[in-house]
Amino acid sequence: MDFLTLIQVLDSTVRLATPLLLACLAGLFSERAGIFDIGLEGKMLMAAFFSAAIAATTGNVWYGLLAGIASSLALSGLHGLASITFRGNQLISGVAINFLAAGMTVLIAQDWFQQGGRTPSLISGGRFEPITLPFADAIEPVPFIGPIYSELLSGHSILVYLAFLAVPATAWILFGTRFGLRLRAVGENPAAVDTAGVSVVGLRYAAVMICGLLCGIAGAYLATALQAGFVKDMTAGRGFIALAALIFAKWRPWHALGACLLFGLLQAVALRFQNIELGTIVIPVQFMDALPYILTVVILAGFVGKAIPPKAGGEPYVKER
Amino acid sequence: MTVMKSLMGAVAAVALSAGAALAEPALIFDLGGKFDKSFNEAAFTGAQRWAEETGNSFREIELQSEAQREQALRRFAEAGANPIVMAGFAFGDALGQVAGDYPDTSFVIIDMVVDAPNVRSVVFNEHEGSYLVGMLAAKASKSGTVGFIGGMDIPLIRKFACGYAEGVKAVNPDATVIANMTGTTPAAWNDPVKGSELTKAQISQGADVVYAAAGGTGVGVLQTAADEGILSIGVDSNQNHLHPGKVLTSMLKRVDNAVFEAFQDGPGLETGFSVMGLSNGGVGFAVDDNNAPLITAEMQAAADEAATKIATGEIKVHDYMSDDSCPALSF
């Protein structure tokens, strides 16, 4: 494999890892606060549809992004209502959100655009265009550094840079602020937080809303930056891979970055090389596709350290009996 | 109890009268969905054309999961729909189980062979149509490298790829054909993001014409090809209009004709094995206003000549499904 191929694979990794990273951080906030969320997939899908639909009708991608985030927040609110206020089962609520999104997006798309559950193709202005970083063209001829800067780092849409900035931001919020401390505490021992006079319900709602925001950006990235429009079920299981990445990262932000980049790299390698020949052994592409899940199972089984979820995760908080 | 009884009686009466009243034909779409701009949509177009020309109506259902296949078949058969047409190879097993239970109902399955006295199995010679678009691709390519992106990795899609590769090699024996599959699960039919990445990967390997046989995933392939300034080839339905001037052509698979004919023949249609190829207009390639500037007279003439030779049997295009191997391409 020559250097340029390596750069192209890494470039593809960045594109593929971005939606995973955003969804993974979304899940991180929610689960750290004790709300399991397997509805990441549904929220991304809903956001993908509404961002594409509004961007197509207004011709302005920023309105699309806002609409995507708003739709994802609405689903988050629903999840919060079901699992925080009404203390329902969080997993069931998440599954319901996935079904709701899968059905509603196609239904609304058909009603609005009559194109069989898809949105019209977005033209320029309705899409996030790649950003060329300053001096990218000037540096390109420089060996080694040139391609890295101009091919790998430059030329992504603004949402990619936003996603990568979200990692230190998440780490700082969770581990550097009072809000973050309380949020983590709510996921470990909500009774203690309540005793200290801080609202458990308020914190958990805040967490699921941040989750909705990030899922909204992830969905908008899929539909308006990577693609030019919405196609039914276009998230294609990325919300679940993000959940796997979250477990793989053991619910830590920097590790989430690593996990998402690793899973993105696996996908990129699988897409680029299909069957990989290592000497006499041929690794089939199917194995590469399955690897993220296999790795997650290995981690869950406790072979590589232990993945311990937040202690109060999945349990609705009951203030008084 | 009595209320329940009379209620059930009423329901049964309604069901009976409904069953007696209709011998409407029915069409079952596969998981790709009715408006996939491709295979299923072609089936729908054929049914629609029949409804418009005859003024009759037909019944239809879009499947949501694998488990519904047999259920949908039985429901239509019980309701008296006849003939029942199903679009997709995946119905094979379900139909094999159901067909015997309804000997008076005629079934038509597209893309698959089911051996039963009341089943018509329609298969297309996709390799012949793919051969033609492969020739066009090779002629349009400047780099000598062309790409193929399939949806789910199944023998049928490999049949597309194989015919395409043979067509390419027929024009330019030194050409490189890069063939990729999107995945191995039905999700591979609806993953445009992966389609885009595959296209980018093929472009970076030098491909300047990409043929997508991938359902909804193909939307991403065609989009990326248009964005990156290379040519693409659509599949099943005419997809030239998706990106005018950027789609070289589309490999047409006249699923609409198959559905139309089945509906036209009505109950008791001729069963057995039916092959739709170049010789009877079952496959072909699309030329319209959107891609006319891309297809030169020379390209058109060469493709037409090959089409005639294939139809008469002078050129034999290899069918991947006949022996699970491809002389022009290794997977």
Image (cartoon, helix red, strand yellow):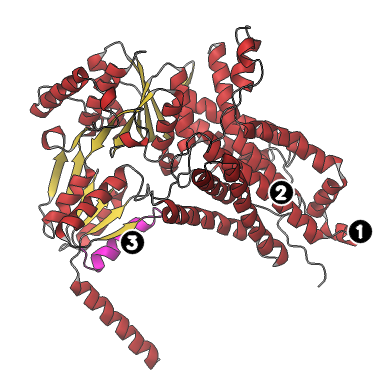
Secondary element under disc 1, as helix, strand or loop, is loop
**A145 relative position to B44: left or right:** right
Residue plotted at (19% across, 20% down): B297
Mark 3: amino acid: Gln
Horizontal and vertical percent for residue A44? 58, 46
What residue sits right under mark 1 in the picture? Answer: A196
Please tell me how crowded label 3 is: few (under 14), some (14-19), or many (20+) other residues with Cα within 10 Å.
few
Q: Which residues are magenta?
A: B63-81
Q: Is residue A130 magenta?
A: no
Horizontal and vertical percent for residue A74? 63, 56
* One can see residue A263 in this view: yes
Secondary element under disc 3, as helix, strand or loop, is helix
User: Which quadrant, please, contains the N terminus of chain B?
Assistant: bottom left
**B99 relative position to A21: left or right:** left
What residue sits right under mark 2 in the picture? Answer: A210
Outermost residue on the bottom side: it is: B2
What residue sits right under mark 3 in the picture? Answer: B71
Task: Place residue B80 in its image quadrant.
Answer: bottom left
Outermost residue on the right side: it is: A196
Up the image or down, A126 lies above or below B179; here it is below
**Separation (CA) of disc 3 from disc 2:** 42 Å
Q: Tag 2 or tag 1, which sits nearer the N-term?
A: 1
Disc 1: host chain: A
Task: Place residue B10 in its image quadrant.
Answer: bottom left
Out of A69 and A24, give the one closest to the viewer. Answer: A69
